[in-house]
Image (cartoon, rainbow, N blue to C red):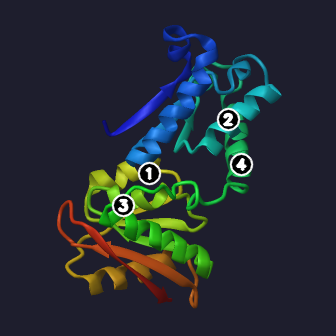
């Protein structure tokens, strides 16, 4: 699967209602470890179908899904048939922004004893380096999106800028939390990637002149192994 949608309304029909929250947390956690996109949906702000403000419990529900690590939260009836679609979107965005400010990286949380693959080890090291240097940006060269998601699973404070030559990958990464995708024409060498990464970082405003950025790359071929993380000053 390219990703998972946690549709709590449907889950509530299939399993006991008291089990839904635990099923949600389990699926989000498994998606994070498997580097898959996960969307939490249905009945997020259900009362806003008829009312201009959500209940406090609904606001907490949205925030908890974000704290669990979901990539995206989705409205359904609130925006499709509700009386206050714009307000629902605005309030959900406000909850997301506020919750993001208190989220910490998960380097310790994901520090289990199993042997890591090369890509995961390099990406984990890149996040740790970015945290130590307080770098505002991690730039990743990715063909299929796996490297960008391998960085994302550790929830770095830094924004992740994913450079890809694959249009499908660029679109898919839009759903990955904390990832900004940028489609580029070609990356023929590591030097090309470093040059492009610095240019895009500055042009996009994600980093400023003099900032430290961490750049992650590897074999620049389809499904290549990410094996290099380096530090650069713009």
Dot 3: within a 10 Å radius of its alpha carbon, few (fewer than 14), some, or many (20 or more) residues? few
Q: What residue is drawn where x is 78% and y is 20%? A: 51
Measured in 3D between alpha carbons, the distance from the residue under mark 1 to the one under mark 3, in whole angstroms, is 26 Å
Q: What residue is drawn where x is 60% and y is 60%? A: 105
Q: Are marks 4 and 2 in contact (CB under 8 Å)?
A: yes
Residue behind mark 2: 62
Measured in 3D between alpha carbons, the distance from the residue under mark 3 to the one under mark 2, in whole angstroms, is 32 Å
**Which of the two residues, 109 or 208, is positioned nearer the viewer here?**
109
Q: Are marks 3 and 2 in contact (CB under 8 Å)?
A: no
Dot 1: within a 10 Å radius of its alpha carbon, few (fewer than 14), some, or many (20 or more) residues? some
Residue behind mark 4: 99
Residue behind mark 1: 174
Q: Is residue 138 above or below residue 93?
A: below
Coordinates of residue 156 in the picture (x, y in percent) = 56, 63
Measured in 3D between alpha carbons, the distance from the residue under mark 4 to the one under mark 2, in whole angstroms, is 9 Å
Circle nearer the N terminus (4, 2): 2
């Amino acid at each position: 699967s390219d990703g998972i949608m946690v549709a709590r309304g449907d889950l509530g029909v299939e399993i006991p209602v008291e089990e839904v929250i635990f099923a949600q947390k389990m699926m989000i956690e498994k998606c994070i470890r498997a580097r898959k996109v996960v969307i939490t949906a249905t009945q997020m702000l259900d009362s806003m179908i008829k009312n201009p403000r959500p209940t406090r419990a609904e606001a907490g529900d949205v925030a908890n899904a974000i704290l669990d690590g979901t990539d995206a939260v989705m409205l359904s009836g609130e925006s499709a048939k509700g009386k206050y679609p714009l307000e629902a979107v605005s309030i959900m965005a406000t909850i997301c922004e506020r919750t993001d400010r208190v989220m910490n990286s998960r380097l310790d949380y994901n520090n289990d004893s199993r042997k890591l693959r090369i890509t995961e080890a390099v990406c984990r090291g890149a996040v740790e380096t970015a945290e130590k240097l307080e770098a505002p940006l991690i730039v990743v060269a990715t063909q299929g999106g796996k490297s960008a998601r391998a960085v994302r699973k550790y929830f770095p404070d830094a924004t992740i800028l994913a450079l890809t030559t694959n249009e499908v990958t660029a679109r898919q990464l839009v759903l990955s939390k904390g990832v900004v995708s940028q489609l580029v024409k070609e990356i023929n060498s590591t030097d090309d990637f470093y040059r492009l990464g610095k240019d895009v970082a500055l042009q996009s405003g994600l980093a400023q002149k003099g900032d430290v950025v961490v750049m992650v790359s590897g074999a620049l071929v389809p499904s290549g192994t990410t094996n290099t993380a380096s530090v650069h000053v713009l």
